[in-house]
Image (cartoon, grey):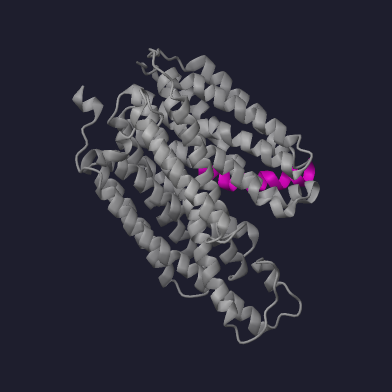
Amino acid sequence: MNNSPLPLKRNWILAALMLTMFLAAMDIAIVSTVIPQIVGDLGGFKKFSWVFSIYLLTQTASIPVYGKMADMYGRKKILLIGIVIFLVGSAACGASWNIESLIAFRGLQGLGAGSIMAIVNTIAGDIYTVKERSKIQGWLSSIWGISAIIGPALGGAMVEYVNWRWIFLINIPIGLVSVVLLMMFLKEKVSVIKTKIDYLGAFLIFTTLTLLITFLLNGGQAWAWLSFYSLGLFGLVAALLCLCVYVERRAESPIMPLWLWTHRPFLGSILALMGMGVIIMGPETYLPTFTQASLGIGVTVSGLILASMSIGWPTASALSGKLYLRIGFRNTAIIGAVLVFLAAVSFLLIPYPQPVYLLVINQVILGAGFGLISTPVLVGVQSMVDWNQRGVVTGATMFGRNLGQSLGAAIVGAIFNASFSQQVSEAPFDLPEQDGNILQMLQTPSLSAEAKFFLKGAINTANHHIYYGMAILAVLTFAAIWLIPKKIQTKEESN
């Protein structure tokens, strides 16, 4: 059993957790900013999307495995291993000699990031009480907002004054500081239970999730949804999933216990965060493109509009404790789902061209909804189990959110592309083809003013269709949250 450290030590541990989370969050923001320079140096334009895909793939697929390992061997050991893997991957990325080597090393980075995503929140659940966790989740959530603002600026500065390779190398000193703090201040008393390790289950789960995410990320992009590749991959995923269930039902200590999927509180929580993950990808993927291409807003301002979501998220997360202690975890998350629905619908009601200040307000409300969903759901499931199961349930909820984002990338892309392509096919005049690059289409010198106006309107309409989808998904997320019992008996109350 793990004993909570003294308050002063907890502050140092929290600093270490925030630095560790900063590694994963900053990496996503900064790589997105400088990918044109990376491709310009290494080449391989047609493969550059895998720089992001492989990272998300290995991260998501490894989360459940890390969660189980943290319960078996302790959080500290597994988190330190994950940080070291991440830093080795970062150093290797900085030394990449072509796009293929960078993709491989990004996969290694993602394996380390899986540990960070699974265990940072688990440790927070270990050392803080139910009353304190909302504030702590607010601090941890704020890291993503800070990264969204600092990442592009830092990436641009490094490319201009040093070299793009330093966006990976800068992770090393930050990671080493977090390692030192964790080694000095995080003390665990772990009773290792001798049990047969579920190696087969770990392999099957990792392989199944890897193939599933590959299917989601490439369907409709690298190949058609109804192509031989898609159907074959889907069939393989379905067969492996059945085999996973068979193996995990019989395992002595399963990596992904089936009670996570049969008990309403855990099932509802995982599905709720999965729904939230899908919705997040709407603005994250297409809001900057919409604001730049349709509204003519600059790159920096469009990035700040998206980052304004990170104002509402940590604020609502920090304040959610007062709500869930008074009205319960489920009711607090329901308020969050309602806010997400209202944000999606209100975006549809803003007249075109949308003013920047209204877009910012909309993003703040959307972020507040996410904060009121994510924190009560996570704290709720953590509070229901003992220390030796907290890693599994935290890993499962984080996995649900990441899988939702993978689903969201496919769903949002399909909605936007179908809507935009349909409108372009019905255009009353010929439009240039720029391999799907909307900004390049608008910058074509021969494009008439009428054609530009038409394209901007088509982008606006396609973006509206995404928000219609977000509203529907908010209702489905509401339904998933409703699966969670109104009253949850926490371990602190039962003890």
Residue situated furthest bottom in the rendering: 428
- Of 357 and 77, which appears nearest the observer? 77
- Of 411 and 153, which appears nearest the observer? 411
- Residue name at image x 55 percent, y 27 percent: 82
**Residue 320 in sight in this render:** no
**Viewport quadrant of the C terminus:** top left
Q: Position of residue 236 (x, y in %)?
A: 49, 46
Q: Which residues are magenta?
A: 144-162
Q: Is residue 222 above or below residue 258?
A: below
**Residue 123 in sight in this render:** yes
Q: Is residue 477 magenta?
A: no
Q: Is residue 350 above or below residue 7?
A: below
Q: Is residue 422 above or below residue 259?
A: below
- Residue name at image x 34 percent, y 22 percent: 387
Which quadrant of the view contains residue 5? Answer: top left
Q: Is residue 477 left or right of residue 19?
A: left
Q: Is residue 121 above or below residue 177?
A: below
Q: Position of residue 421 (x, y in %)?
A: 57, 73
- Of 244 and 452, which appears nearest the observer? 244
Q: Position of residue 194 (x, y in %)?
A: 39, 13
Q: Position of residue 380 (x, y in %)?
A: 30, 36
**Viewport quadrant of the N terminus:** top left
